[in-house]
Image (cartoon, rainbow, N blue to C red):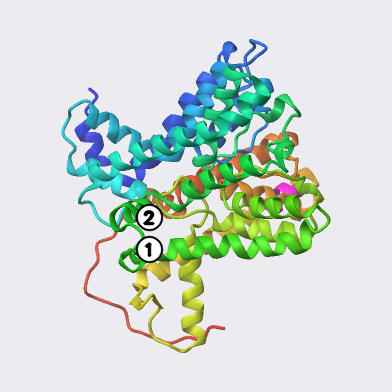
Amino acid sequence: MFNLTNIQKRLNSFQIIILGFLGMILLGTLLLMLPFSSQERVVTPFSDCMFTAVSATCVTGLVVKDTATHWSLFGQIVILCMIQVGGMGVITFGLAIISASGKKIGLWHRSTMQESISAPQMGGIVRLTGFILKTSAMIELIGALLLAPVFCKDFGFFKGMWYSIWHSVSAFCNAGFDLMGTREKFSSLCYYHDHIYLNCVIMLLIIVGGIGFLVWHDIKTQKLDFKKYTLQSKIVLLTSLLLILLPFVYFFFYEYNRLPMTDRTISSLFQSVTTRTAGFNTQDLSAMDESGTSIMVLLMLIGGSPGSTAGGMKTVTFAVLFLAAITVFGRRNDVECFRRRLPETAVRNAGAILFMYLVLFLTSGIIISRVENLPLLTCIFETGSAIGTVGLTLGITSKLSMISRVILMMLMFFGRVGGLTLIYAALPSYENNNSRLPLEKITVG
């Protein structure tokens, strides 16, 4: 007999998070296979539906079927729901449903929610969940209203409003799914490459979603008093700013220097913002040189911030690794930032995450390159986009074989759920004890 209590005792928080995402993917796949999910009213192959469901739930944006021209309104609604749940987190929605039903939120639910959104403590987790849902709905509504004048003018009122809602949710959730295929398939936002207003709204939604709910809660609590922010909020804001400005300078002077000044500026800024997990593009990415493509791969691997709608290694991981390197170069004992000392566990976790991401995305890129007989840089761009849950592509996604698609689906799932979550879910936990093995020094570097 089905017993939820027994399940709670047998599964840890990490396993529940994984099962939640898998359940959402399976449900989305089955709904997309229904004949009325496609515009031609035919059954879409299971593999295509599965790839789309994984990409939507993991807020990636890689597609094998053009979203606007292949899927019906019902199919698009299913995809948008998966984007919304995947962006907010399956556990967040589950906890909200339990709370709304009047049931008691137990310790097990709170612990799972804490792991899901990377909250520092369990206290106040229910209030934080409410803040996440209310803030997300408000931001997406404002985004849709800001986009409405543009899309309603181009597509009419009803279709324009649907496009506004869709792109607001997709941008805030850093998903990168678009409905611009009605102009040209797989064209993303290239038609609006010189539309300053639309570009700015989309960029703001991407940045807000990628910064993370914990940072916005900190901003709400402490207002604009930066000194009172938590260390994580300070690191997220500073790192995010640098990862926007530095790539912007490169794109401005080396990639888009042939464009008119206004188009050059907005395209460079948009490329810098979208690369770290959003997945929209306003310029032809295949026209970029190898240096620009390589920089984009690095940005995609870094991704957004912890507890956000974005994927990737996360900005804090990158910052901790950078600070650890500075500590070694300066021959200091402790990793420090903003007059605070970072715990050794944070440095070890950051190193482990970097190792996992590099091994997975490089190995997968090499395999796809051999299987598809494609240039390695093109393939690692695709795998970097998948594991960073970005969604940018050099145009090869829809042409890949089943083996390569399965690899990309695994990378997207890994990038959204998180490497440590998968490891902790798969491996048993070990109790700490006071006994330690003898220490012997080795030489590295």
Residue at mark 1 to residue at mark 2: CA–CA distance: 8 Å
Q: Quadrant of the N terminus?
A: top left
Task: Identify the residue shown where x is 36% and y is 60%.
Answer: 224
> CB atoms at circles 1 and 2 under 8 Å apart?
yes
Q: Position of residue 241 (x, y in %)?
A: 53, 62
Task: Identify the residue shown where x is 62% and y is 14%.
Answer: 43
Q: What residue would you read off at disc 2? A: 215
Q: Position of residue 408 (x, y in %)?
A: 62, 42
Q: Position of residue 400 (x, y in %)?
A: 73, 37
For residue 94, above or below residue 1: below
Q: Nearer the viewer, residue 325 or 239?
A: 239
Mark found first going from the N terminus, 1 or 2: 2
Residue 408 marker: none
Residue extending farthest to the right is: 258
Question: In this image, 431 relative to 75: left or right?
Answer: left
SS at mark 2?
helix
Q: Main secondary structure of the magenta part?
A: helix
Q: Position of residue 199 (x, y in %)?
A: 63, 43
Residue extending farthest to the bottom is: 331
Task: Identify the residue shown where x is 65% and y is 54%.
Answer: 269
The stretch of residues the image draws in magenta is 365-370
Q: Nearer the viewer, residue 183 or 419?
A: 183
Residue 118 showing in the rendered view: no
Residue type for callout 2 = Val
Q: What residue would you read off at disc 1? A: 232
Q: Look at the image and say whether residue 278 sits in the magenta stretch.
A: no
